[in-house]
Amino acid sequence: MELSKNIFFNTDKLVENQTVKISYTGQFFQDGSSEVYLHYGFGLLWENLGEVKMEKTDLGFQAEITLMSADTLNFVFKNDQGLWDNNQNCNYIFPIEKVEIENVVPEMGLIVAPARRLRKTYIWSKKIKLAIYKIITYLPKIISGNYKRKIRDE
């Protein structure tokens, strides 16, 4: 998915505690830089700073990082000559979505919906409504004699 010009992620949305692959086809890829580094941090204050060397491929420079629990992922690119691509001094900033803790199974990391139990009063009210419907529908037919059973031909 393309979230910004020349920056692609391998996922539709960024979710905390997930690993994401970032692909970069911007200025340094187009200029033929031999090495590009991804300099990143989380939140408005760029906490948990990290820097990773990106791998050069035919599709651009690529790197994988694990997202921290924060509101945003912030990053810039630096090449081997010390030049920066920082989105014209605005940095590249993308929102990170939160995961609801009660819906995560810790061992497998799967997200499941919480189980709902029907109340006994709800079940009994449905049974009573069905019984009343059948009585109102079929009792007058039986009393008047207009109720005929369908006979199957065997």
Image (cartoon, rainbow, N blue to C red):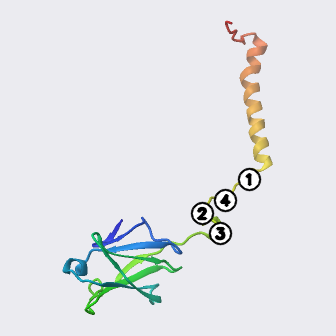
Residue 57, given in percent of the width and then of the height, sits at: 30, 72
Residue that numbered label 4 is attached to: 114
**Which is nearer the N-term, disc 3 or disc 4?**
3
Q: Amino acid at mark 4?
A: Pro
Residue 141, given in percent of the width and then of the height, sits at: 73, 15
Residue at point 21% right, 77% down?
30
Residue that numbered label 1 is attached to: 117
Residue that numbered label 3 is attached to: 106
Q: Is residue 117 above or below residue 137?
A: below
Kindly report the distance in space between the C-alpha atoms of the residues bearing marks 2 and 1: 21 Å
Question: Does 76 sit left or right of 83 as displayed?
Answer: right
Residue that numbered label 2 is attached to: 110
Which circle marks residue 56 in the picture?
A: none
Kindly report the distance in space between the C-alpha atoms of the residues bearing marks 3 and 1: 23 Å
Residue 38, given in percent of the width and then of the height, sits at: 36, 83
Residue at point 38% right, 80% down?
93
**Which element type, helix, strand or loop, lies under badge 3?**
loop
Q: Is residue 42 above or below residue 16?
A: below
Question: Does 115 sit left or right of 70 as displayed?
Answer: right
Nearer to me, 130 or 117 = 117
Looking at the image, do the residues carrying marks 1 and 4 touch, with CB atoms under 8 Å apart?
no
Q: Is residue 140 above or below residue 19?
A: above
Question: Does 50 sit left or right of 82 as displayed?
Answer: right
Q: Quadrant of residue 2?
A: bottom left
Position of the N terminus, as image quadrant, is: bottom left
